[in-house]
Amino acid sequence: MNPYLDDDLEAIAAQARRFAEARIAPGYLERDRTRVLDRTLMAELGALGLIAPELPEWAGGQGLPTRAAGVIHEAIARADLSMSYVNLLASLNGQILVQHARRELAAPWLARMTAGTALVAIALTEPRGGSDAANLRLKVERRGDAYVIDGEKSSISAADQADAVIVFGRTGPVDSGARGITALLVPTDTPGLTRSRFDCHGQRAIGRGSLFFDGVRVPADHRLGDENQGFAQVMQGFDYSRALIGLQVLAVARAALDETWTHVATREAFGQALSSFQGVSHPLAELDTQVEAARLLCLQTLWLKDRGAPHGAEAAMCKWWAPKLAYDTIHQCLLLHGHGGYDRGPMEQRLRDVLGFEIGDGTAQIMKTVIARRRAGRSAVPI
Ligand SMILES: Cc1cc2nc3c(=O)[nH]c(=O)nc-3n(C[C@H](O)[C@H](O)[C@H](O)COP(=O)(O)OP(=O)(O)OC[C@H]3O[C@@H](n4cnc5c(N)ncnc54)[C@H](O)[C@@H]3O)c2cc1C
């Protein structure tokens, strides 16, 4: 029995697992090859109520705790990390739209996101860098009842598959830092917006790419939060995605561990099961322990969020620890499969998939700075 999950949440997890095993897992390798998210599967997820159930009912959700979203993320990511981006983007961006968009703007988009018929991406990173996020340059200018956007965003997940993007741009002077940033919702069919696709190491079905803005005009009522306050207000949502990302990558690691325990118990060397050698079983036992502990930290972070308690430091802990641990775990599992693990297949794909989250949504160094700042105050922030 897990202290952060009750019978209702366990039932949601079981439903999501059944769907993921039957419908999502079989196409894991194929989607890595075709590099396309399956829109039919997205809509099936939506029809089952498995996308962002924590959102309020007016927003297409069911008003459930964020831990419900967490256990669904785990189930989908275990089958295909790229597919679980549908859940991640809907939970992160859905929360942002609920909190910061006008309801007339948000409601139709949220209905489509939770139904699995629209994908909304989020664009912060620029070619000059992502870690120093408050130093962004994308130009946003207010002209009458519209904002006009010029510049480039880079390394954006689902850039070429999204139906809309939450874009952070500079409305203040170049040196205004975090205080001169405004967030906008930009439909991707807006004239002047073009997109590219990168050739990624992993997470290939969701993909990443650039967005090019050439005089892109969006109505002023597409603004999220207040003008010049986009960074302080809208960025709060990232505490949520950090815990969800932790659960996603740990679920991938758990799948690798489960398969590897079975493999080492059945494959023999020197006339004995591999698991009889402590050089095989002890590293696995250690990783299994840490994966279990990290999962509890992620669920605890969501539990704190569900109670309205501060959880910024815990979220940053999830985000630096879980992707590194998941990578190390899958690496060990791959090695214990011998040469077979190195062949194109689920194990090597998992390794490529989880690596992206050691960078995406903020690197380990940045997360550790977030934690240090919560503990030691501004003295822990680089000048
Ligand atoms: C799979 C994936 C998905 C992504 N999805 C999105 C997305 O949907 N939307 C989006 O906006 N962005 C996205 N990104 C971009 C991501 O957020 C950035 O790559 C990340 O924030 C780091 O920025 P950077 O790559 O420019 O590295 P840089 O900022 O150039 O940093 C390079 C290295 O220096 C280190 N470093 C920088 N500053 C410090 C410091 N003060 N102390 C110690 N070390 C430091 C970093 O940790 C890193 O290791 C994604 C990236 C990946 C890989």
Image (cartoon, rainbow, N blue to C red):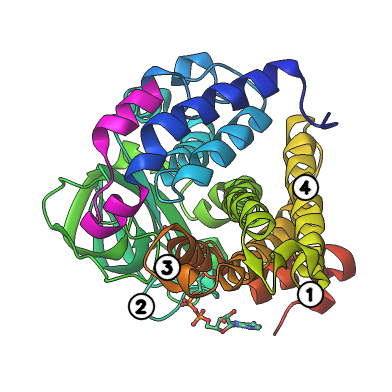
Q: Is the magenta stretch mostly helix, strand or loop?
A: helix
Q: Are marks 3 and 4 in contact (CB under 8 Å)?
A: no
Where is residue 10 shown, x and y percent of the image? 69, 23
In what quadrant of the picture does the N terminus appear? top right
Question: Which label lies toward us, 1 or 3?
Answer: 1
Q: Distance between the residues labelled 1 and 3?
A: 43 Å
Residue 279: image tag: 1
State the residue position of label 3: 125
Question: Which residues are the magenta region?
Answer: 28-46
Kind of element beneath mark 3: loop
Q: Which residue is drawn at 31% across and 57% down?
A: 32
- Horizontal relation, residue 311 to residue 131: left or right: right
Determine the residue positioned at 61% across, 48% down: 251
- Res. 364 image quadrant: bottom right
Q: Which amino acid does label 1 sit on?
A: Gly
Of marks 1 and 3, which one's residue comes earlier in the chain?
3
User: What residue do we see at 44% from left, 57% from top?
Assistant: 346
Circle 1 SS class: helix
Residue 221: image x %, image y %? 33, 36
Badge 2 element: loop
Distance from label 2 to label 4 (Cα)?
30 Å
Looking at the rendered structure, the kind of residue marked 4 is: His
The answer for how far apart the CA atoms under marks 4 and 1 are is 38 Å
Q: Are marks 1 and 3 in contact (CB under 8 Å)?
A: no
Residue 88 shows in the view: no
